[in-house]
Image (tube, coloured by chain):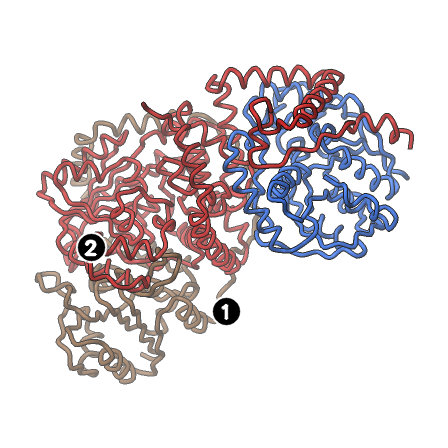
């Protein structure tokens, strides 16, 4: 039986990193899922939630619940957005009429690697990526969703991929949403430390479960004119022997 | 011209996070802590169970705070000790100062106590003509530098041995000719020995107040806490009301967990229990024993159902050590007694949300603090709640409020959201096409100061979905 | 006894203008009900059970940077004591005045001036001149390699003032873990008969400079346990 997936594409992925979602769709379809994209979706509410504007985040969260409440599975290429839905909606929507729908939805909402490994029980997706890669453990996937090994299990099955561990791989990259702008100096210093850990591995690519970390890191690496590039996990898994030659070079 | 705490924080954070020597010293210190901490945790068979146990102990204590404090007080008084309840810093400082003056104290030796930093006790005593010696090596070093502790457990971790040797040469003895840590410790020991024997009063903090036994518990490695409480004829304990624990046996888990989280040790070298003045038949010890229980805003936190657990903190410093923000901006940048995640959560409660709300925002909400806290305080969550409290109290900028109102309007209208996104990308592409990235016309200039511009695809994902993905 | 208690409480209250106000604030705060999180999982073992206390104690001593010398009888203990004292610089030795230690010193006959603890003399506590202190312990704790002392073990300074602290103990004093040691302190009301107790786990140390471990800070650089297997 084909699993029916409703894809949730975080707003910044939709607007700035569409390849991330395209590759997510590719992998999910390749493992035999039916994927749909509810077009009324916008944002999970995290920017407002994390800046303290819960009054503004709440209607946005309710909109999300309304859009997705009939989904079998919601899969999202961002651990951070999933953690908002799973860990914070119960509190944010504690007095909302959609409270129970939100709780039910939270249990059917998964981060991309989490869905593959824990729900679909797939680690081999038939990907080929003959490159050196280092892995940054994005905070919310790691600490809110407790995904420590799942992304690595997927990477280890990729043909030709050589995984190189970086030091302090579990230390935050410094993105943090509005933090990156409100406290740009601190965010950049943290990003620089992370970039140094990445560079020390000599890997060609750095990957993670959160494209937001990678967008920030790509910016830091780009400014430093570093040779390492960022690539989202699904974009590695989407590479098959034909595709990898042509498109690996253009990832965000 | 007076700077607000937030402006000063931003300024100092920019300076410190660009200070590569600072970063190297801190990174090296934290790396060695990380190794010791993990090794220490491995010594405990079930670390999660230990955390749960400690959380349960502190929860029980805080949820019956009045009862346990009275139990503690009764025991101390029965042994001939004194217990003074101070509502705020001023009451606490005045009590200690009056006591010292009345008893003719001219020299005080202090062992580490963050509460005395919080209430700013030393300046009050010094103004009364009393010489105050900090005796913990790290505290002694920062006292010589006339600066506050950098970290609640390792106060001088921002300095390297060369800086400390130079400081000692300038302030203590021009003959200091080595920067070997053992040599520097020995130099401090010689000077502080004289102070221990000269002092009439020793002031200590307390890591725990044990209710059933009616004793204070102090953890120290150097032994200075022991000397402060053994030699001078008066011993004053200054501590927060939240330090109480129900039973002596609770220390069987709290002591190892505190040591593991603080330094990675299996247990701190000296776990000292003191319940009163020297008893008849004992060969030494203080003749007067005073405990100053400081409230200073703590009791207000009890009424906060969401954040009462912040009072469970045992001040181990683990959240500072793991915090990537702390690691980059350093302890002094916070401008508060308690730096790092616990400080960012606590300070707005103790000193005002308006002035200190910025600290709750100065976090990427990475959650590392929550994951290490040995009493399982959900620090990252409390940072978030503080942000919510700040916006609800109307303490944030009106321009920001407006932005989020507009954001909300768009997010509830998918077409408006899609159009808005398209427009922003279009405008940015024009600006960047004109070579104006980073200029005053660039709305992303703060982002671009440290980063290359974000990618600006011509089509959003939803556009591509419609075009060629939906049908598949 | 209850009467003095009452008088003192009253006295404490008169000098405590904020006491009742703080207590009232605490009680008011506690009226806010905080939902209890899920109860603890039961039956968890936090610490590895101690199988062989003596072996564990010796292991922990190594980790704690302290010396533990096993001796067969009191004669061997006396020899060990002489050896340790001889290795120290010239200077007096402070000894807890206890019959067992009187016998030990007599047997060891060290070539050092001995100062005996005394509650009634100003010379009865260790001072700056003391090169070593010799005391008994209330218990030894295998789990953490600790010794438990109280004020009865020669006072507060006896375990911290001199550069070397020597503890004379027998294996029957070993308890498996901290929990046992602390509950014994509670049961035997040790803190009612002593104003002070301390769990000491090694020599004094600091890592305040560059996190580098320095042995011998304000307290003893050496902690020596002479652990006698027979009484």
Quarter placement of the C terminus of chain B: top right
Tell me what hue chain A is rendered in. Answer: blue
Q: Quadrant of residue C175?
A: bottom left
Disc 2/disc 1 C-alpha distance (Å): 51 Å
Q: Is residue C111 above or below residue B107?
A: below
Q: Chain of mark 1?
A: C
Residue A201 relative to residue B167: left or right: right
Residue B232 relative to residue B375: left or right: left
Q: Is residue C27 visible?
A: no
**Image point (60%, 50%), residue name:** A169
Nearer to me, C188 or A98? A98
Give the percent coordinates (x, y) of residue B452.
63, 36
Q: Is residue B4 above or below residue C195?
A: above
Nearer to me, B85 or A148? A148
Q: What mark, if any, has residue C51 been given in the picture? A: 1
**Image point (73%, 16%), residue name:** B416
Give the percent coordinates (x, y) of residue A230.
69, 44
Quarter placement of the N terminus of chain B: top left
The answer to the question of whether label 2 and label 1 lie on touching residues, with beta carbons closer than 8 A, is no
Q: Is residue B101 above or below residue C124?
A: above
Q: Chain of mark 2?
A: B
**Image point (75%, 52%), residue name:** A155
Residue B404 relative to residue C149: left or right: right
Local SS, label 1: loop
Which residue is under mark 2?
B172
């Amino acid at each position: 039986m084909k699993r029916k997936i409703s894809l949730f594409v975080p707003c910044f992925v939709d607007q700035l990193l569409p390849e991330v979602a395209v590759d997510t769709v590719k992998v999910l379809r390749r493992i035999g899922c039916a994927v749909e994209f509810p077009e009324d979706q916008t944002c999970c509410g995290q920017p407002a939630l994390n800046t303290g504007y819960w009054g503004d985040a709440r209607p946005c969260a309710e909109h999300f619940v309304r859009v997705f409440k009939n989904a079998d599975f919601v899969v999202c290429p961002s651990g951070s957005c999933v953690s908002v839905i799973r860990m914070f909606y119960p509190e944010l929507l504690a007095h909302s009429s959609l409270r129970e729908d939100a709780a039910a939805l939270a249990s059917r909402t998964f981060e991309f690697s989490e869905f593959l490994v824990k729900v679909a029980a797939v680690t081999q997706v038939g990907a080929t990526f003959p490159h050196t890669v280092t892995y940054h453990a994005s905070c919310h996937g790691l600490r809110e969703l407790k995904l420590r090994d799942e992304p690595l299990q997927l990477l280890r099955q990729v043909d030709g991929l050589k995984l190189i561990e970086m030091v302090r791989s579990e230390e935050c990259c410094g993105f943090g949403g509005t933090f990156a702008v409100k406290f740009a100096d601190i965010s950049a210093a943290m990003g620089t430390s992370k970039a140094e850990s990445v560079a020390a591995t000599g890997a060609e690519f750095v990957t993670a479960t959160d494209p937001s970390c990678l967008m920030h890191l790509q910016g830091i690496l780009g400014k430093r004119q570093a040779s390492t590039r960022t690539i989202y996990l699904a974009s590695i898994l989407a590479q098959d022997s034909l595709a990898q030659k042509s498109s690996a070079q253009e990832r965000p | 011209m007076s700077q607000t705490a937030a402006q000063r924080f931003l300024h100092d954070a920019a300076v410190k996070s660009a200070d590569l020597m600072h970063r190297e010293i801190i990174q090296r210190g934290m790396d060695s802590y990380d190794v010791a901490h993990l090794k220490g945790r491995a010594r405990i068979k079930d670390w999660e169970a230990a955390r749960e146990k400690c959380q349960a102990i502190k929860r029980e204590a805080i949820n019956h705070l009045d009862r346990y404090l009275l139990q503690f007080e009764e025991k101390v008084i029965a042994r001939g000790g004194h217990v003074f309840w101070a509502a705020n810093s001023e009451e606490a400082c005045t009590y200690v100062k009056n006591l010292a003056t009345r008893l003719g104290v001219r020299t005080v030796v202090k062992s580490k106590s963050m509460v005395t930093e919080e209430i700013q006790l030393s300046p009050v005593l010094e103004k009364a003509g009393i010489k105050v010696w900090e005796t913990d090596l790290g505290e002694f070093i920062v006292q010589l530098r006339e600066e506050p502790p950098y970290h609640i457990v390792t106060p001088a971790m921002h300095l390297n041995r060369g800086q400390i040797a130079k400081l000692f040469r300038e302030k203590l003895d021009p003959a200091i000719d080595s920067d070997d840590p053992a040599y520097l410790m020995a130099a401090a020991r010689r000077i502080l020995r004289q102070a221990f024997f000269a002092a009439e009063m020793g002031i200590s903090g307390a890591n725990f107040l044990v209710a059933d036994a009616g004793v204070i518990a102090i953890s120290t490695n150097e032994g200075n806490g022991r000397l402060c409480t053994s030699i001078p004829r008066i011993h004053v304990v200054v501590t927060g009301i939240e330090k109480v624990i129900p039973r002596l046996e609770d220390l069987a888990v709290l002591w190892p967990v505190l040591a593991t989280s603080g330094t990675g040790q299996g247990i701190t070298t000296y776990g000292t229990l003191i319940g009163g003045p020297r008893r008849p038949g004992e060969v030494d010890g203080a003749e007067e024993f005073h405990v100053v229980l400081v409230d200073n805003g703590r009791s207000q936190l009890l009424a906060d159902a969401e954040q009462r657990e912040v009072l469970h903190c045992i001040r181990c410093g683990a959240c500072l050590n793991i915090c990537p923000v702390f690691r980059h901006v350093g302890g002094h940048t916070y401008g508060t007694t308690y730096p790092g995640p616990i400080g960012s959560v606590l300070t707005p409660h103790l000193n005002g949300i308006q002035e200190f709300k910025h600290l709750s925002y100065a976090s990427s909400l990475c959650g590392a603090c929550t994951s290490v806290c040995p009493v399982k305080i959900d620090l990252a969550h409390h940072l978030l709640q503080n942000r919510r409290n700040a916006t609800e109290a109307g303490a944030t900028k009106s321009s920001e409020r407006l932005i989020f109102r507009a954001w909300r309007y768009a997010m509830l209208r998918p077409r408006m959201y899609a159009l808005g996104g398209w427009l922003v990308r279009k405008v940015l592409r024009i600006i960047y096409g004109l070579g104006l990235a980073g200029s005053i016309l660039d709305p992303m200039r703060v982002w671009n100061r440290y980063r290359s511009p974000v990618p600006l695809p011509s089509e959003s994902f939803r556009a591509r979905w419609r075009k060629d993905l939906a049908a598949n | 006894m209850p009467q003095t208690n009452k008088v003192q409480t009253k006295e404490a209250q008169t000098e405590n203008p904020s006491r009742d106000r703080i207590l009232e604030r605490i009680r008011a705060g506690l009226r806010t009900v905080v939902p209890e999180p899920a109860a603890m999982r039961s039956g968890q073992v936090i610490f590895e059970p101690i199988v062989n206390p003596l072996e564990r104690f010796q292991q922990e001593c190594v980790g704690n940077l302290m010396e533990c010398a096993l001796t067969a009888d009191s004669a061997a203990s006396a020899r060990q004591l002489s050896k340790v004292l001889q290795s120290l610089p010239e200077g007096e030795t402070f000894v807890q005045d206890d019959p067992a230690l009187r016998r030990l010193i007599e047997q060891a006959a060290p070539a050092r001036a001995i100062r005996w603890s005394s509650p009634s003399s100003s010379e009865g506590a260790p001072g700056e001149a003391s090169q070593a202190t010799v005391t008994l312990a209330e218990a030894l704790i295998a789990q953490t390699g600790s010794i438990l002392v109280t004020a009865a073990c020669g006072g507060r300074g006896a375990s911290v003032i001199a550069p070397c602290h020597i503890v004379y103990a027998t294996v029957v004093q070993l308890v498996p873990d901290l929990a046992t040691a602390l509950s014994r302190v509670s049961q035997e009301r040790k803190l009612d008969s002593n104003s002070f107790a301390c769990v000491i786990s090694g020599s004094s140390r600091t890592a305040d400079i560059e996190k580098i471990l320095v042995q011998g800070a304000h307290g003893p650089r050496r902690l020596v346990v002479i652990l006698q297997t027979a009484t």
